[in-house]
């Protein structure tokens, strides 16, 4: 076993009785169950985990918390996995990224020597000349840029899951404050959801093996709290869960592996703790540099000592505790320095070889990892004093001097963040009543303070939703407890200006880059961010936001408060797009006859969410069947509304421009519907079933808008009219062709003669034993009946009709054939042949407008238009040269477009191309020549104003 | 084709999906209804352990609208054959009946015959598919499909809500089967097959089983099922 592995300890997550193996860049690596990939590599002595984005500098384990970019690798084909939090899986294939030919020998590492040539923003000023080389530049830059390679053959996770949770109190953070808050809220009777990004509860206490206060080690304090939470039935724990968004409406979005939970709570407590960021000094990115909490995680949770001899840099008691933890793990303290000048006494207790108060780190030395560390004394202004440097040999440099509260979620909800000099960081203020903070993020620093603060937050949350007694309510309004000054001291940023002092590890942005950007005029934190890309990398600013603000402030002479912050938006952590999309619930709407079509060899088409048969055999054969025998089409997608009420007739009369009130029961009328501007929005039929009962059909896809329109005008409740959407209740088929009557007569006892059921008449009765409404209407130019029947009979009726018409040459026909057939009759399709500017006068529907009616929707607009010259007209046309234009092709006069083609099809019956188009009024004359620009040439057509086929409707009305 | 030989049958919108699941069938009032998808005793046991889904689209459904609805609707709850009365909004009720028949519709209309105002009754049995979700994991399954608050304090037993379920407008009715959590989900028939398969996908890891009338009978021996009770219900979802 590696000599870096420490003895087994109860705080560890690793099970050494369960060995695992994975490969890293082709080499086998031994690990144990419970380890992360980066921890296992660390145990094996792998120091370099990645190469930096721009300069390809070596990077090693730093935060061990999934925040920095240093450990990104490709795992089992998935790029940019944070291996410091990714558990090892047996047999996993792990590959380094962004290095060639290998991580150890990356040829692009030479870029580190040319940093002067490629400062921040260089790409705005280079690769401009010669311009013809830009495509080459672009290809090269694309290959150099980016992190990780996406494998397009990789199957996306098929199991993305979305769960909606509702609770009284949601708590973000499973550390001591969050646990206390959850327990207190539950004590008062609240249901709580506790969201924790760790696999185990306890927060930062899990990796503190020593006792901070009293004699109980911190990790045991955590475990006791966690046990109480696990035993509390009112608390639901989401572990390994990261809250990445806080949205309006008290909505928290949480990612847990392949599940996204949307948590809605009456009250939310954010106990998200804090995190460290690196200090800025020369070569602060060398492998061997660790954040204080990071190395404590590696030691405590995975039992690994990444080095033998450490320099610890502190600026508060957190740092000194980190030094004690390292020493307890057997790591020699080569030096401990603390920026606080009065920390001598505390430093002496650590037993370090070198203990310096009022000092900080100024440089790390080494080629592949830390080998030596240079320290310097801080002067009164916080600058390192030249000449005071001391260099210490070490293989670990621990930075425990850059702590800040984790306010990422709070900043999303636009909470104010106020910089508190006494607390040394920005803390949230002005929170809405339903949102509170607890623990370190609220400003508590000691363990006792954190626990008290958390308990109070839970109490307040429960009381605000009406739980607890009078004593609880009184206690909840007491002043916030547990907030303590940190006493931390930070070196000033003013002295820093070097190319190897990295502010942004993700984007390789140095202090010198920041200085140059400010000099170029990008002196606002927002523009500084955009120009330098600081905070825009995978860490999303967690490692660099605080430092970049400090630098901007010190270099511009402003205060930190005045400098402000950049804008925080969700997600707070990376979220796969597939998870945001959720499960693939793709609605498919089916007519009642849907499955029967597959038996006839259908080709489907999508019409919104509906599936409709496009064609079964060929368009030509289907059209011929309708014209010569009998065809059947599924029109179940038509919108169908049942309209009842004492005022139904008058209401529909008012809604439509044509007459409805005088429609007799048993009769049908074509309906066209307009909006208040007189624009065509839909058409269909109205059938009167009784004095106060109407059956209205609409176009496929128009049903929702028509229904809303009808409901809208009834909102005042003044009319007795009730509409019911029965679209899904009814199947519908259109049986059309010269033999349609003969076919239907075989399956019904109804008298279908023209005398009994004339054109635009209806009948009700049994068809093949099924109660049905028959409408004698025609869209396809032949004798035809539209049958509407209860949907549950669809499967039966379709096959029964096909069987009954077998010897009559029946054929199913689809939407494509229907489009040809209706075009032969010059029937318009609103929304296809018309648009948002089409009024009925121009669309040759003036006959349907009865301006003599006292009122109807659109009357005012149409009255103004009536008698005015038309701007355009919708006409039929046939091509003289057989060309088939595209729908949307321009009608031209010379080179100028003067209209457009809306529909164009080849008619097998007529043997030529026919269509409809908008043309200027002077061309809307029978026989006029029109020119259509299609496929870069101009073709000739002739205007036709009457239906191409059976213009008098004799076959239709026979 | 001799007219006397017509033997129409009625199927729900999820019929073909259930055929693919090897359901066995029975003819009930002209409807082809799934009796079982395997062993009924096993189905009943899995419902008790996890969650089961039953296609109950054959239930009658009457849409009742009008100014006289609110004043007299409670009388409809006591009519024979009425399972439940859902009230999505004032002036509107959805009555679920054991079966679709004119007798119940006429009975409902007669309740309002003397009431001032107007009432219009429309049979929408065919318009809506209905699925019963029953079992301890029923709420967990629905939490994967809808964002409404399913906690008993918000949607208690015998209460209904209009909501969106798997991107489709739906009415969700909380109706426990004795001690077992139960819901009835009503969606447009055109989305029935989609909803049936979506429910199966969402319940994959929750022990979901389809079940038929045979398992329903076994469960009803120990729990009171929806077809045997009638309650007044309903509020809108938030």
Image (tube, coloured by chain):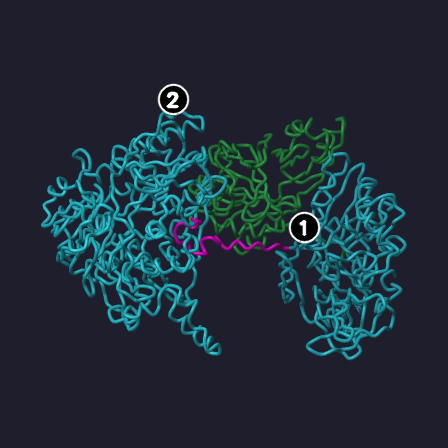
Q: Is residue B131 left or right of residue A206?
A: right
What residue range appears in magenta?
A567-590
Q: Which residue is mark 1?
A: A791
Q: Is residue A619 magenta?
A: no
Could you say which disc has been placed on residue A847 in the image?
none
Could you say which disc has been placed on residue A474 in the image?
2
Choose top left, top right, bottom left or bottom right for residue A186: top left
Element on which disc 2 rests? helix
Choose top left, top right, bottom left or bottom right for residue B213: top right
Vertical comparison of A103 with A459: above or below: below
Asked if one can make out residue A433 in the rendered structure from this viewpoint, the answer is yes
Asked if one can make out residue A14 in the rendered structure from this viewpoint, the answer is no
Colour chain B is painted in: green
Residue at mark 1 to residue at mark 2: CA–CA distance: 63 Å
Of mark 1 and mark 2, the one earlier in the sequence is 2
x, y percent for residue A138: 44, 72
Vertical comparison of A948 with A164: above or below: below
Specify the subunit that label 1 lies on.
Answer: A
Query: Between A12 and A866, which is closer to the camera in this rendering?
Result: A866
Q: Is residue A585 magenta?
A: yes
Query: Between B17 and A251, which is closer to the camera in this rendering?
Result: A251
Choose top left, top right, bottom left or bottom right for residue A586: bottom right
x, y percent for residue A63: 27, 52
Residue at (47% x, 45% y) in the render: B43
Q: Which chain is cyan?
A: A
Chief secondary structure of the magenta portion: loop
Vertical comparison of A465 with A371: above or below: above
x, y percent for residue A525: 41, 52
How packed mark 1 is, by other alpha carbons closer than 10 Å (few <14, some 14-19, many 20 or more), is many
Labels 1 and 2 positioned on one and the same chain: yes
Number of numbered discs present?
2
């Amino acid at each position: 076993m590696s000599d870096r592995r420490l003895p087994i300890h109860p705080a560890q997550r690793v099970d050494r009785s369960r060995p695992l193996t994975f490969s890293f860049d082709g080499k086998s690596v031994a690990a144990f169950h419970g380890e992360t990939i980066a921890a296992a590599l660390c145990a094996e002595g792998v120091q370099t985990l990645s190469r930096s984005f721009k300069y390809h500098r070596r990077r090693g384990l730093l935060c061990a918390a999934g925040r920095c970019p240093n450990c990104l690798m490709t795992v089992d084909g998935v790029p940019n996995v944070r291996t410091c939090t990714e558990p090892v899986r047996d047999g996993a294939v792990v590959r380094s990224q962004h290095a060639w030919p290998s991580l150890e020998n990356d040829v692009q590492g030479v870029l580190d020597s040319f940093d002067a040539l490629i400062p921040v923003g260089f790409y705005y000023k280079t690769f401009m000349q010669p311009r013809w080389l830009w495509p080459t530049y672009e290809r090269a830059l694309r290959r150099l840029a980016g992190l990780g390679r996406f494998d397009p053959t990789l199957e996306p996770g098929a199991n993305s899951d979305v769960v909606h949770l509702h609770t009284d109190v949601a708590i973000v953070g499973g550390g001591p404050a969050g646990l206390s808050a959850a327990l207190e809220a539950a004590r008062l009777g609240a249901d709580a959801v506790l969201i924790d990004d760790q696999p185990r509860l306890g927060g930062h206490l899990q990796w503190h093996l020593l006792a901070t206060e009293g004699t109980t080690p911190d990790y045991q304090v955590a475990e006791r709290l966690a046990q109480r939470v696990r035993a509390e039935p009112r608390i639901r724990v989401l572990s390994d869960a990261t809250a990445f968004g806080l949205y309006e409406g008290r909505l928290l979005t949480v990612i847990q592996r392949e599940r996204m939970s949307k948590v809605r709570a009456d009250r939310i407590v954010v106990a998200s703790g804090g995190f460290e960021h690196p200090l800025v000094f020369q070569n602060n990115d060398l492998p061997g540099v660790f954040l204080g909490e990071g190395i404590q995680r590696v030691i405590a949770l995975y039992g690994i000592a990444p080095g033998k001899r450490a320099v610890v840099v502190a600026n508060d008691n957190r740092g000194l505790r980190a030094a004690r933890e390292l020493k307890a793990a057997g790591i020699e303290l080569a030096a401990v320095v603390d920026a606080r000048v009065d920390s001598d006494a505390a430093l002496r207790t650590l037993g370090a070889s070198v203990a310096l108060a009022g000092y900080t780190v100024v440089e790390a030395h080494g080629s592949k990892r830390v080998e030596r560390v240079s320290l310097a004394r801080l002067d009164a202004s916080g600058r390192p004093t030249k000449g005071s440097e001391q260099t210490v040999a070490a293989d670990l440099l621990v930075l425990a001097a850059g702590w800040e509260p984790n306010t990422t979620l709070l900043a999303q909800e636009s909470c104010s963040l106020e910089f508190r000099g006494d607390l040394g960081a920005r803390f949230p203020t002005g929170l809405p009543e339903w949102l509170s903070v607890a623990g370190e993020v609220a400003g508590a620093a000691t363990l006792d303070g954190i626990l008290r603060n958390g308990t109070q937050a839970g109490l307040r949350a429960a009381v605000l939703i009406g739980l607890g007694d009078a004593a609880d309510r009184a206690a909840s309004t007491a002043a916030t407890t547990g907030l303590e000054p940190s006493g931390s001291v930070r070196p000033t940023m003013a002295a820093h200006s070097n190319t190897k002092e990295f502010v942004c590890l993700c984007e390789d942005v140095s202090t010198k880059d920041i200085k140059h950007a400010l000099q170029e005029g990008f002196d606002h934190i927002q523009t500084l961010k955009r120009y330098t890309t600081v905070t825009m990398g995978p860490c999303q600013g967690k490692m660099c936001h605080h430092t970049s603000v400090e630098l901007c402030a010190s270099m511009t002479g402003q205060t930190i408060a005045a400098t402000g912050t950049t804008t925080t938006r969700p997600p707070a952590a990376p979220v796969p797009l597939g998870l945001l999309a959720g499960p693939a619930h793709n609605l498919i709407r089916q007519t009642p006859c849907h499955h029967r079509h597959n038996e006839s060899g259908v080709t489907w088409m999508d019409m919104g969410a509906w599936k409709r048969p496009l064609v079964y055999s060929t368009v030509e054969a289907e059209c011929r069947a309708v014209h010569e025998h009998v065809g059947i089409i599924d029109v179940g997608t038509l919108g169908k509304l049942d309209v009842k009420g004492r005022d139904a007739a008058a209401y529909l009369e008012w809604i439509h421009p044509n007459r409805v009130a005088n429609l007799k029961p048993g009769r049908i009328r074509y309906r066209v519907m307009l909006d208040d501007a007189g624009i065509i929005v839909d058409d269909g039929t109205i059938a009167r079933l009784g004095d106060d009962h109407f059956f209205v059909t609409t176009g496929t896809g128009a049903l929702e808008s028509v229904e809303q329109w009808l409901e809208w005008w009834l909102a005042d409740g003044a009319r007795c009219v009730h509409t019911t959407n029965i679209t899904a209740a009814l199947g519908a088929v259109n049986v059309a062709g010269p033999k349609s009557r003969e076919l239907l007569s075989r399956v019904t006892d109804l008298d279908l003669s023209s005398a009994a059921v004339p054109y635009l008449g209806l009948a009700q009765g049994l068809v093949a034993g099924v109660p049905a409404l028959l409408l004698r209407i025609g869209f396809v130019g032949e004798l035809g009946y539209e049958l509407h029947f209860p949907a549950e009979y669809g499967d039966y009726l379709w096959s029964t009709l096909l069987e009954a018409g077998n010897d009559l040459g029946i054929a199913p026909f689809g939407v494509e054939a229907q489009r040809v057939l209706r075009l032969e009759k010059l029937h318009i399709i609103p929304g296809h042949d018309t648009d948002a500017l089409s009024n009925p006068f121009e669309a040759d529907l003036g006959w349907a407008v009865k301006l003599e009616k006292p009122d109807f929707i659109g009357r005012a607009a149409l009255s103004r238009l009536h008698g005015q010259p038309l701007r355009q007209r919708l006409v039929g046309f046939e091509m003289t040269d057989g060309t088939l234009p595209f729908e949307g092709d321009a009608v031209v006069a010379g080179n100028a477009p003067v209209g457009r083609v809306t529909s164009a099809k080849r008619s097998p019956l007529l043997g030529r191309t026919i269509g409809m188009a908008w043309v200027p009024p002077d061309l809307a004359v029978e026989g006029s020549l029109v020119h259509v620009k299609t496929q870069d040439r101009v073709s000739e057509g002739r205007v036709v104003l009457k239906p191409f086929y059976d213009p008098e409707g004799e076959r239709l009305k026979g | 084709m001799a007219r006397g030989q017509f033997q129409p049958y009625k199927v729900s919108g999820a019929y073909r999906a259930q055929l693919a699941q090897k359901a066995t069938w029975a003819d009930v009032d002209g409807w082809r209804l799934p009796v079982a998808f395997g062993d009924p005793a096993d189905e009943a046991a899995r419902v008790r352990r996890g969650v089961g889904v039953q296609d109950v689209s054959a239930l009658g459904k009457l849409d009742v609208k009008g100014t006289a609805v609110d004043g007299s609707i409670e009388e409809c709850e006591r009519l024979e054959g009425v399972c439940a009365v859902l009230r999505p909004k004032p002036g509107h009720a959805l009555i679920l009946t054991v079966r679709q028949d004119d007798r119940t519709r006429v009975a409902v209309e007669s309740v309002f015959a003397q009431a001032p105002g107007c009432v219009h009754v429309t049979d929408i049995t065919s318009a809506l598919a209905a699925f019963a979700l029953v079992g301890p994991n029923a709420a967990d399954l629905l939490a994967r499909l809808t964002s409404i608050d399913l906690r008993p304090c918000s949607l208690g037993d015998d209460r209904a809500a209009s909501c969106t379920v798997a991107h489709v407008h739906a009415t969700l009715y909380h109706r426990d089967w004795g001690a077992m959590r139960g819901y009835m989900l009503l969606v447009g028939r055109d989305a029935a097959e989609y909803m049936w398969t979506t429910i199966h996908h969402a319940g994959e890891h929750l022990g979901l089983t389809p079940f038929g009338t045979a398992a329903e009978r076994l469960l009803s021996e120990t729990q009171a099922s929806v077809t045997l009770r009638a309650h007044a219900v309903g509020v809108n979802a938030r």
